[in-house]
Amino acid sequence: MLVQRGKSNCPIQVKWLAVGFSSNLLGQLCQLLVGTIGSQLFFPRAGFTAELKQIEQRGYLVVGVKENLRPLGFRNLDGQLVGLEIDLAQRLATELLNRENSVRFKAVQNQERFSDVVAGKVDLTIAQATATSSRARLVSFSLPYYLDGTALITRDATVQSRRDLAQRSIGVLSGSSAIAVIRYHLPGAKLIGVDSYADAYKALEAGKITAFAADLTVLSGWVQEYPQYRLLPDRLSVEPLCVVMPKGLQYDGLRRQVNAAIARWQMEGWLKQRATYWGLPWNQLGSISQPSNQILPKILQSTEERLPLVVLLPDLNR
């Protein structure tokens, strides 16, 4: 879908981003953006999102995070925000501003991970966001801090690897990118669509499905909450999680600082340590900055760019 000149207040053509924005919100975003036509990038108007100097003068960093996504960002029994992405936000703020307790959190829903950055409601978001070409027209992405991707859980003792599911029933969230991933790896499996994680749990408990496919990070939290389930050792795809930052030359300082921090944490082993602490399987494909040469990418794209960048991992035992 294209917003044509004359049909909105935006002086440029903007390709519809299938990330949950409503058409009204898209029109509002147009008013917040100045851009160029074609392949040029969009740049937010100055003043909507704080530059690094403004953040330093303010004395704290405003970060959009999840509050209901264990183990990335969730509230513990005391009501405190905890998780891998909370750790990242706290350390990033400490390093940027050179003092402790210099971060303020804003809970965000999926669609707000990007719109809140554009509108200046937050300085950046760290909220299970994957980079896509369409999203990159609105915001900038950091180096990845974790490699998410499609994984499988089950409690069936006869299932030890994905090959044991070749002719079995697998639950998937309706409309999720996991559908294409499972069809690629297990074309003979029967896919059962569910509308929510709660519905997936009910289907598993009732024996309607043998396994459930979803994001590795989400399923890692699942098995922490329901220890009768286990993750299969296969990771079927790779989707890098990145910090979402504002686009524009005036924010180069902020982006450089964020990327430098992530690169340093990777080299120091801090990212691995925190991911392991929160029960997340660490990247088994080598360094984030140097992924394994065994990855044979097949990029899933749709005409409306609804799917994130997904790298399918080959079955090396075929």
Image (cartoon, grey):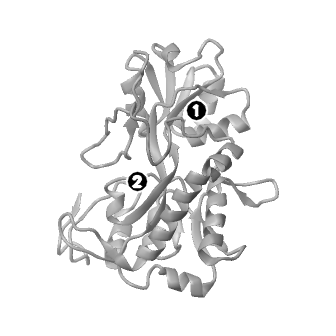
Mark 1 Cα-neighbour bin, 10 Å: few <14, some 14–19, many ≥20: many
- State whether residue 126 appears in this view: no
Q: Is residue 302 left or right of residue 44?
A: left
Q: Residue at x 64, y 69 (%)?
A: 105
- Asked where in the image residue 21 lies, by quadrant, the reply is bottom left
Element type at mark 2: loop
Q: Is residue 32 left or right of residue 84?
A: left
Mark in front: 2 vs 1: 2
219 is higher (above) or lower (below) than 272: above
The three-letter amino acid code for the residue at tag 1 is: Ala
What percent of the width, then of the height, locates residue 294? 40, 30
Element type at mark 1: helix
Determine whether label 2 and label 1 are within 8 Å by CB.
Answer: no
Q: Nearer the viewer, residue 298 or 268?
A: 268
Q: Nearer the viewer, residue 231 or 32?
A: 231
Q: Residue at x 49, y 39 (%)?
A: 149
Quarter containing the C terminus: top left
C-alpha span from label 2 to label 1: 26 Å
Which residue in the structure is indicated by mark 1? 200
| Furthest residue toward front | 268
What percent of the width, then of the height, locates residue 215? 53, 39
- Asked where in the image residue 313 lies, by quadrant, the reply is top left
Which residue in the structure is indicated by mark 2? 131
